[in-house]
Image (cartoon, grey):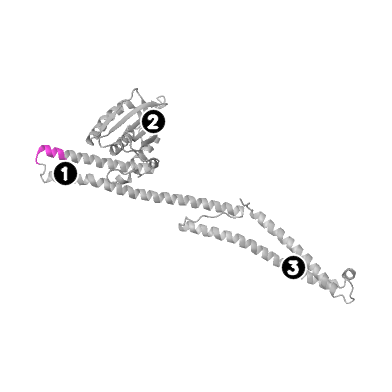
Amino acid sequence: MQKKTTLRGLYLRTGVLMLVLSLVIGLALVAVMLSIFAARDPRGRSFVQSMTALLKQEFAGQGIVPYFTAGMILLCLAVAVVCVLLTSRLAGRLSGTIRELCRAADDLRAGDLDHEILSCRERELDELCQSLEGVRQRLKAAALAEEAAKEERGLLMANLSHDLRTPITAVKGYVEGLRDGIAGTPEKQAHYLDVVYAKAQVLEGLVGNMRDFSEYELGRMQYQFEYVELAPFLEDVFPEYESDAASRGMTFTGKPLAAPVTVTADRGKLKRVLDNLVSNALKYGKPDGTVVLSGEPYGQGVVLSVSDDGKGIPEKALGHVFDSFYRADSARSSSVPGSGLGLAICRSIAESHHGKLWLTSREGEGTTAFLYLPLAQKEEDP
């Protein structure tokens, strides 16, 4: 790595160089003037004899004065030329670096964040370069994040529009059937109303997802923590999941906890996590497959698991399933409803409970989602 030079050192080095060059030029001029004086000696004496005579004349106040005056004038001119040249060189070096920094600042102001700001040879200016490069990198990261968020919001709207269209179309169709009298019997009318109610629940869930995403994106998700006994909590949700599985021609198996377990949790948010995990298992499981929800103590907490016997998730996609809007199987994205937000929000909820959410999967065998929650510390308020 090239050693950096300080501006003070650069100025000092330039000054020393000026002094040395001035001395060299001065000595050279003295030698030249003495050679000229000796060559013009009318008596034809040698150089040494001429110098001896010159010194005698100097002490006598004769002969050397014109040569001395001319030498001083030439020396002053030479030193001035050296100073101007070295100062111009120094100014050109610094002004070139400053111009590059100004161009870099103009690029940042104009929003051009792709050009890297290179380092400088001078330490102080290099620190400024590094600071500007850090600003450029942060601005670029922020711009990329903003672009990704913009793309995510657009994708969210597209997914929600697609997901909203199906239940709205169904509601309109069944309401028109009721209005036009197509459902002529009380049984058929009840069936129509049941379908409309079910689709309204789907719409309610989509609106809830939109609200959750807004809170998740803004970091303003609200929690109402309390002590929750997991065994009765799970037993309350088992019938709902059994009904959902039966409507898809699948089987749900809920395994109660073997021992009482208490956690500190938000009941609504915890149920939303389980709803999402079970819903994913039902969506991507075999048409006549089985979904199992179970739990067991683990260390200072409890682990809840939701497993299916579906086609599984490819290993290369497993690390991205918690990314917003990511869907592992793009081929079926249009046939399976969902915005791709569920697991990202679930992970945020799990972390807010000081827990952890992760998946394991094997292609052709199925997927298991694990939710770890720490046990409640009853000596503390939740």
Label 1–label 3 contact, CB within 8 A: no
Provide the residue span drawn in magenta: 184-192
- Mark 3 against mark 2, which lies toward the viewer? 2
In percent of the image, x 37 and y 32: which residue is there? Answer: 371
Element at label 1 = helix
Residue at x 64%, y 53% (from the top left corner)? 6
Numbered badge on residue 373: 2
**Residue 68 visible in the current orientation:** no
**In the rendered image, which residue does mark 3 sit on?**
76
Asked if the magenta segment contains residue 191, the reply would be yes
Q: Nearer the viewer, residue 34 or 322?
A: 322
Instruction: Decide which of tag 3 and tag 2 comes sooner along the chain.
Output: 3
**Residue placed furthest toward the top:** 259
**Which mark is first along the chain, 1 or 2?**
1
Q: What residue type is labelled 3?
A: Cys
Mark 1 = which residue? 174
Horizontally, is 6 left or right of 319 in the view? right
Q: Position of residue 319 (x, y in %)?
A: 40, 41
Dominant secondary structure (helix, strand or loop) of the stretch shown in magenta? helix
The three-letter code of the residue at mark 1 reads Tyr
Q: Which of marks 1 and 3 is nearer the N terminus?
A: 3
Disc 2 to disc 1, how far (Cα)? Answer: 43 Å
Coordinates of residue 104 in the picture (x, y in percent) = 52, 57
* Mark 1 and mark 3: Cα distance apart in space: 105 Å
Instruction: Tell me if label 2 and label 1 are in contact, CB under 8 Å.
Output: no
Amino acid type of disc 2?
Leu
Which residue ends up furthest to the bottom in the rendered image? Answer: 42
Q: Is mark 2 on a helix, strand or loop?
A: strand
* Image: 179 above or below 92: above
